[in-house]
Image: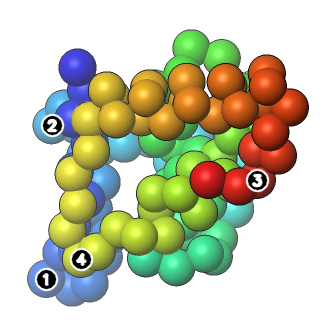
Amino acid sequence: MARYLGWRSLSGECVVMVDGAALDQRLDLYSHSPTGFEWGYGGSGPAQLALAILAHHLPNANDALALHQEFKWSWVFFFGPTWEMTSAQIEAWVQRKRQQIRSGYDARQN
């Protein structure tokens, strides 16, 4: 199970690690924020972080692209100065979203 950690360095830079290694920003998929990750609000830095987390977790990059904005509003928006999450938490969220989509639920809602 992967473990994702985020914190701010002494200089204020956002640091995100997954299992002890820096998380790839995945600018190859979409460049919301080439200046880096952010969290705690709904902007471009949090969108890049949401995409990077889902792209790391999901085997299909298209799924990450389809779900990352919702993931931003469900999770990344609420991250504090330091945060931690696991692949099990991400997978539970993804499965819930897929079930909502299959049942015709508006996936933009939590």
Q: Amino acid at mark 2?
A: Gly
**Distance from Cα at disc 2 to Cα at disc 3:** 32 Å
Label located before the other in sequence (4 or 2): 2
Label located before the other in sequence (1 or 3): 1
Label located before the other in sequence (3 or 4): 4
User: Which callout, 3 or 4, points to the residue nearer the camera?
Assistant: 3
Give the numbered dot on residue 10.
1
Q: Position of residue 88 (x, y in %)?
A: 31, 26
Q: Is the residue 5 above or below the residue 76 in the image?
A: above
**Distance from Cα at disc 1 to Cα at disc 3:** 36 Å
Q: Which residue is mark 3?
A: 108
**Distance from Cα at disc 1 to Cα at disc 4:** 12 Å
Identity of the residue drawn at 44% across and 26% down: 91
Q: Is the residue 70 above or below the residue 43 in the image?
A: above
Q: Which residue is mark 4?
A: 81
Q: Is residue 55 visible?
A: no
Give residue 83's quadrant in the image. Answer: bottom left
Q: Position of residue 103 (x, y in %)?
A: 79, 25
